[in-house]
Amino acid sequence: MSKKLVIVESPSKSKTIEKYLGSDYKVVSSLGHIRDLSTTGKYGFGIDIDNNFKPNYEIIKGKKKLVTDLKKYVKDSDYVYLATDPDREGEAISWHLYDALGLKKDNYKRIVFNEITKDVILSSFAKARAIDDNLVKSQETRRMLDRIIGFRLSKLMQSKTGGKSAGRVQSVALKLIVDREREIEAFIPEDYYEIDAIFDEFEAKLDTYNNKKVEIKTEEEAKDIISKLSKIFNIASVDKQAKNKKAKPPYITSTLQQDASTKLNFTSKKTMMLAQKLYEGVSLQNETVGLITYMRTDSIRLSDDFVKPTYAYIDTNYGSEYVGYVKTTKKTENIQDAHEAIRPTSINRTPESVKEFLSNDEYKLYRMIYYRALASLMKDAKTEATTVILDNNNYQFKATGSILTFDGYLKAYSEYEDNKDIILPDFSKYKKNTINSNEINYTMHTTKPPARYTESKLIKEMETLGIGRPSTYATTIGILSERGYVKIIDKKFHPTEIGIETTDKLQEFFKDIINVDYTREMEEDLDKIADGDLAYTNLLRRFYDEFEPKVKEAFSHMEKKPAEVTGEMCPNCGNPLVIKKSRYGEFVACSNYPECKYIKQPEKDKPKEIMPCPKCNGTIVEKKSRKGKIFYGCNNYPKCDFATWDEPINEKCPECGSVLTKKGKKIKCSKCDYEK
């Protein structure tokens, strides 16, 4: 047995890392979290509110054997390294492992790595440290806040509305969608007109009259203006400016999810699953290696270990004139700069060189990540931006465009660039400084309401507003759909009736808590805990003392939504039957509860009939075992015990006379070795 134990979160990650470390180390997986808050105590929080918010943790259901096995590994090892993910959640998982496995300060270390490559893994052991208690407290405070808000508000919504749940970030995200829907409903469209002059090589749009902005509200106004124009335009001015076009910084979690949505048509959930696989390790021809750095980050920082070889790569493959600089951005308060941006672990591991080892979707995502990081270290593109003003009877028309004078980062990134430049002609070629139009026409337009959120736009909005964290975006959005609060139509979020009702009820009683500002300030306070600048119990006490009275008031005064009547009458007491909801779904019961406790039992589906029973006068039907596995048996059971795992057919075995069965394309006897 190895004397050094390394515990990671993922089994696939453990296999990769064990290959790097050699026989002196055993690498095992915790399969993510091993403990969570129990559901004991007040309101089932698993938190002793009256004892300074002391949490009560328990082993997650189904993981007791795993924990027992981990304890055995610990017992047989001299030293333990906790190598969970390099974020606050990973730090908390390490602490739970430390506590649950009975580790001691002198026989463990926490190691952190941002990429799964041999050099980085080996060097991480030289930087081994103790668990960061402040990071753990921040993450566990988040968990306790989410548990308190989620349990109390979800119970409230279930008892008063048709809603199934509510949450600290989830309900704010839903409010954004509902508010946008109301903006759309309140929007009053207005018609307006635009006038365009069409030339051989370009088009120009009417902008001003006597250098004052023109707004055309009616068709008559448009026709009147056109009647005053000739086909000859004077070239009033041509303004040329040299501009630099900067590459975007490398991906962070939110921008990766946004681009994967718009450019690859991936959901945020799918994007994160693919990125997890690329991070944890891919088997290449001669090695197993993580292709990208850790994918949950809001930092655009790049390490020198990546920057320097990438500069050399650009110099060799594109030329020295394309070598750029590291992109920086103003650090906002809610950024956790604990690790790097999302980038390839090696710039020499090109998408084309690993394509055969990846699925099509993995390749698409890796390629996008690779070229984004590469382009971010390349020179700016250079353009000559041109604005021309054309005058016609004191009406000024404007045309804008640009000429690409140096492609810079676009040499590698043009495929993913959103903007397409309009090229204008050389106006010096026109004699007498005039130019003739082919035609002048008008078009009617209608103002449009603000667009509904797509998944990409909602993630961008949440990031901008500072609500939630990179690791929570996909989960939050998924919950809104799973709970029936939104429908996705043409990739856009439409709030459902229950989503609107839930939002309105929460705003009626919790508008001071379920809002963007409060949620953002809560994230900032969690950051302060992580930095050691705020005691977590102070935050929890301040929040709870404000929150709990509001919950009690809501339980007392929130109007309950009447149950939906089915149109049937209770067979026991004659009162109407209604649709009710529980944590397990909808059911039909008497409206006179608790006086009448009648519950209508759902009609069972008639079992699928296969053939007459070969042993009695019954029928062979499709059944399910306790574990859900399909088998075939007689409907006269237990009087008749005929049963088989394979589907029987109405033919007898030519050798022993027993019934024949089929599995796939094979037909064989249910008793003897005969096979057809």
Image: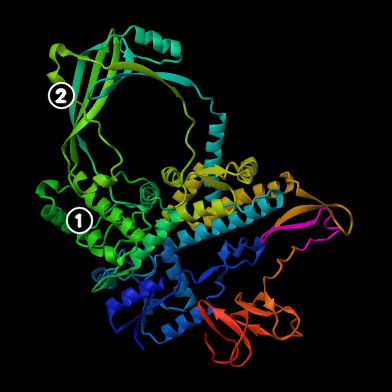
Q: Give, as a single range, the part of the protein colored magenta.
A: 582-601
Amino acid on which the number 2 mark rests in the picture = Asp
CA gap, disc 2 and disc 1? 40 Å
Magenta span: chief secondary structure: loop
Q: Is residue 209 left or right of residue 552?
A: left
Q: Which residue is tagged 2? A: 426
Indicate which disc residue 307 carries. Answer: 1
Camera-side residue of 491 and 478: 491
Q: For residue 670, which quarter of the picture?
A: bottom right
Q: Quadrant of the N terminus?
A: bottom left
Q: Residue at x 71, y 52 (%)?
A: 159
Q: Is residue 464 visible?
A: yes
Q: Please, is residue 518 above or below residue 74 in the view? A: above
Camera-side residue of 285 and 277: 285
Camera-side residue of 79 and 564: 564
Q: Earlier in the sequence, mark 2 or mark 1?
A: 1
Q: Please, is residue 185 above or below residue 168 in the view? A: above
